[in-house]
Structure formats: structure tokens, C-alpha cells
Image: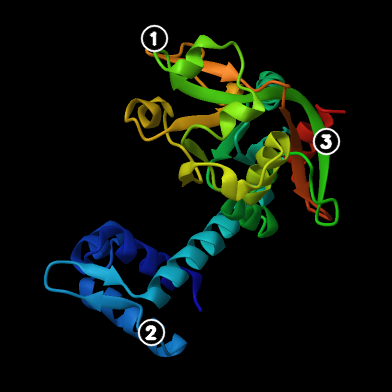
Amino acid sequence: MDIRVLRYFLAVAREENITRAAASLHIAQPSLSKQLMELEKELGKTLLVRGKRKITLTEDGVLLRKRAEEITALLDKTKQELSADTSQLSGKISLGGNPSASVLKQAARLRSQYPDISFEFYSSDAIDVLERLEHGLLDFAVFLEPIDTMKYKYISLTDASRWGLLIPADCELAQKQFVEKQDLVKYPLIFHRRQGLQRLISRWAETDISKLNIAATYNVINGSPARFVESGLGYFLTTEDLLSSSIDKDLCFRPLEPPLEIHYALIWKRYASFSKAAEKFLEQFG
């Protein structure tokens, strides 16, 4: 499977049109069509549904797009690392997950010393981030402790945050300073779908997860969770560090009592092969 053809396939998947893809690649349309047909023949799979107005991916095409993106990204990353000027520390450091304050601080500190180093942050759900870490597309990831030490090495970070509920300022619960165990089972909750976090909360509440009124779950929230609460769907169970420093006046945050904190760790794959820039970044935490 030729890397060049994979890039052709990705261009078609992106443009959803052979003509536009060919133009973006600066090749003739018949040549591009031929390459794609040969790719399908090589794999023995139909990758594209060629409609009148646009091209869509089959289920196999979706899988190939994901793998092709990983392959081309890893190749580009490897080329960039190998071509870096060895006389001057440079390169790109890739981090997944939600970068904590201490990670961003160390990133800024490193870049002030080595301005040719840049950072790439990747946000997605835990499964996707770990998969990219395993495949070498990410150098590091920021994850909640505890960490699977059979697969990853890690450094515990100084960052910690309290769990609590983001709620309407005019609701009954807002009259209290804290959310107690008996309160949590009374209200509809919007909560992360990660089972480990759900078990953590159910242990704190001393109740089975099925007894909690979970109105909705999510994997990644883009933007503020305020809109979920404002819709009336439920109360947003989250950690204080994920909220904006200025919460909407119609909402308020009430921490759990007794306190329940989370702690973050910087993790990386065991036996990872680091670039000089990534090694220097890790030294910052020493």
C-alpha cells in the first residue's frame, strides 16, 4: 500500500468529490480515479460510494480513513523529528487529553528556552487518546490517576480539583454550600460516560450507579457545559478546573462534601522512543 495513494484517498474523503480532490492534489482526475480503483482492488474492498453529487465512505472506507490518518501523521512526525536541526533543539511535542495548568506552565517554560520547539494538543475521548499514544502519534497524555502502570509510565502532577455540581442559581440545591451524598440521588445528572469515573462517584455516594438519576452522558465537551444545565436537562457533574473562571450569573457550582478530589498525571508509553525535544520536556518535571 503506497503512502502516496493513502494521501490521495484522504483527499477524496475530505473533499467528497473526485474533481475537487484532484485539483487540490494537482493531478489529473482520470489518474486519481484509477489510483483509487487500484487501491480498492488491492484491498479487495469497496471504499467509496460514488454518488451523483458527492462521494461517501463505506464502513471499510471509514476504517481506512482512520488508519490512513494515523499512518500519514506518524510518517510526517517521524520525518520532522529526523530532519530537525541537531545543533539546535527544535521539533513538535504532541500531548493528548486535557492539558493541566502545570503542563501548560512547563510547556511555556520550555518554549521560552527553546523557541523552535512547538506543541500540538489533541483533545478526544480516553480511548482515542490512548490509541494514539500507543501508535506513537502522541508523545504524552494527561490522564486522571490511577494509571495503568503495566502499560504506561507517569509523573504525578501537582494539579488537583474538586468534584461538584454545576446547577441553576435559583434551584433548591443552590441554597446549600455543598452537595452531600443524599443530595446526589435526588437530581438528574449529566455525567461523563467513562465507567471508572462513574464508579468513583457511586463509591463516594455509597450507592449503586444504577441508583443515580443519569439523564445524559458525554465523552468530550466542546465549549462550556453551561448550556446543558440551562436547557433543563439536568445538573452537570464535573470538576471545578473544567469550568470557566467566570460562571454565568444564572448558574453556580457546589462542591461535593465530604470533598472528592481528582489528581492528574502525565503519562507516556513504556519503552517509548522520544525525540530530543520530548526528552527535554520530560526533564522539566524532574
**C-alpha distance separating marks 1 and 2:** 56 Å
In the image, residue 47 lies at what x, y percent? Answer: 35, 78
Q: Amino acid at mark 3?
A: Ile
Residue 40, numbered label: 2
Q: Secondary structure at mark 3?
A: strand
**C-alpha distance separating marks 3 and 2:** 45 Å
Taking depth in this image into account, of 44 and 60 the one nearest to the observer is 60
- Residue placed at 72% from the left, 22% from the top? 259
**Which residue sits furthest right?**
286
Q: Which residue is mark 1?
A: 249
- Residue placed at 83% from the left, 31% from the top? 283
Q: Which residue is mark 3?
A: 155
Does the CB distance between marks 3 and 1 fall below 8 Å? no
Asked if residue 63 is positioned above or below residue 117 in the image, the reply reads below
Does the CB distance between marks 3 and 2 fall below 8 Å? no
Q: Amino acid at mark 1?
A: Lys
Quick check: 94 left or right of 26? right
Q: Amino acid at mark 2?
A: Glu
Asked if residue 218 is positioned above or below residue 99 in the image, the reply reads below
